[in-house]
Amino acid sequence: MSFFEKLYDKSPIVFQNLMVSISGYQRNLNRYGKTYYEYLKFLEDFDTWSLEQKLEYQRKELINFIQYTVNNSGFYENLYKNIDINLIQTVNDLKKLPIVDKEMLRKNIDDVVTISKKGAVEGHTGGTTGKSLVVLYTKEDMMKRMAMLDHFKARVGFKHRQMKRATFNGKHIIPPNQEKKSFWRYNAACKQMIYSSFHITEENMKYYVESLNKYKPDAIDGFFMSMCDIAGYIERHNIKLEFIPVGIFPTSETLTKAGRELLERVFKCKVYDQYASSEGAPFVTECKEQVLHIELASGVFEHFEENNDEILVTSFTTHGTPLIRYKIGDSMDFDNTNKLCSCGIQAPIVKEIQGRKLDFLYTADGAKINAGNVANLFKNMPNALIRAQAIQNKIDEIIIKLEVDKTLYKTEYDELLENEFLHKFGRKTKITIEHVDEIPREKSGKFRLIINKVNGEIV
Ligand SMILES: [Zn+2]
């Protein structure tokens, strides 16, 4: 633990707020400079371009980015040594280049990066795959990424740093032995109340809701499951909210339909999804019509191969740690019909972000049941369920952990769940329901609906 962390933990809350804000202002220096404002302006203009203009812009950016990468990254120079990169003139030509995966980058990271740590902005990845990777961004790229995200929110009416934001994230802002029921800190640099995702228990949730009602945020962002927990609590206890946000912007986790409906019902505003990643993938964002669009200025998405939804990304904001045809481990379903969206933005549509490969369970027969369907298991459960988690340690058994409101839960609800389960997983897969006081979170503070420990592909 650093001196700063020790000092933080021992300080009164007022001083902690100050420290959070100071660190916020420091972070802002890398995020909101000249490039940020210029790029924000560019993006506003870019939205008005025709699809052809945008694709031509993307093509030119691609050529420049590959040229830069080969000139500056030893790893890519070597990887492409037998390829004439001048032949890469279109997005389609990308197929001539080899695919790169996380393990390749991790092993060769010193040779992949094009800039030194000093002056760079670090991005950390890891989580679901267990492999961690630190990538470096140039300050300019970081500013462009921030502009892209803020522009996505501005399209639906949220002005970043001018309006109030409530964020649920994995920052350790609450000292371990704090007794006061105050699970949030204020970052004045971003008009942002940060809510700890580690302390959201049934007992504590009323304090969270009281705080939200007092703070009255214009937007809520951060971990999807944490927001769903709070929304579920508000609905179960029929609490009146004293604010209506402009929008809800979840990050980091794959959205479920049921969770999204819950949030929209409780907070009376729309949920806008986005796809971005800490290793620097290009962006997919939802427009005001809640349709997912590829942000063509940010990079290229390809499918790994035909009839496979897994994606490869090439990202124009990764000059520090270039990603070209990078197998990021996520899946998407593209809409190839060239349908126009009524929002007016001409950009390809993504039908669905399917999320991480590991977000699924197997039936005893080896069939995959994706996260959405797993979430649906609980959809028809009466309003007494606080949280659930499905764990698969072996192919023929799934353990469902349930955290319930004991005052409302009836034992027959277990049968309802067993019945739902039977219809999705069949008779051969055994279900074991365990009632627990609290389902633990990941170290990152994220909550995982699914933990699949069955190794390898079983098809
Ligand atoms: Zn649209």
Image (cartoon, rainbow, N blue to C red):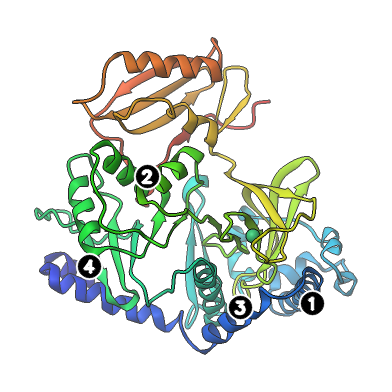
- Residue 317 drawn above or below residue 79: below
Which mark sits nearer the N-terminus, 3 or 2?
3
- Circle 3 is placed at which residue position? 44
Which mark sits nearer the N-terminus, 1 or 4?
4
What whole-number distance in Å separates the C-alpha atoms at marks 1 and 3? 19 Å
What whole-number distance in Å separates the C-alpha atoms at marks 4 and 3? 40 Å
Q: Which mark is residue 275?
A: none
Residue type at mark 3: give it.
Glu
Which mark sits nearer the N-terminus, 4 or 3?
4
Residue 288: image location, x then y, percent: 56, 61
- Within 10 Å of the Cα at label 4, are there few (<14), some (14-19), or many (20+) other Cα atoms? few
Image quadrant for the N terminus? bottom left
- Circle 2 is placed at which residue position? 228
In front of the other: 280 or 117: 280
- Within 10 Å of the Cα at label 2, are there few (<14), some (14-19), or many (20+) other Cα atoms? many
In front of the other: 68 or 359: 359
What whole-number distance in Å separates the C-alpha atoms at marks 1 and 4? 46 Å
Q: Quadrant of ligand 1?
A: bottom right
- Any part of residue 311 in sight: yes
- Circle 1 is placed at which residue position? 60
- Circle 4 is placed at which residue position? 5
- Within 10 Å of the Cα at label 3, are there few (<14), some (14-19), or many (20+) other Cα atoms? some
Report helix, strand or loop for mark 4. Answer: helix
Q: Residue at x 52, y 55 (%)?
A: 273
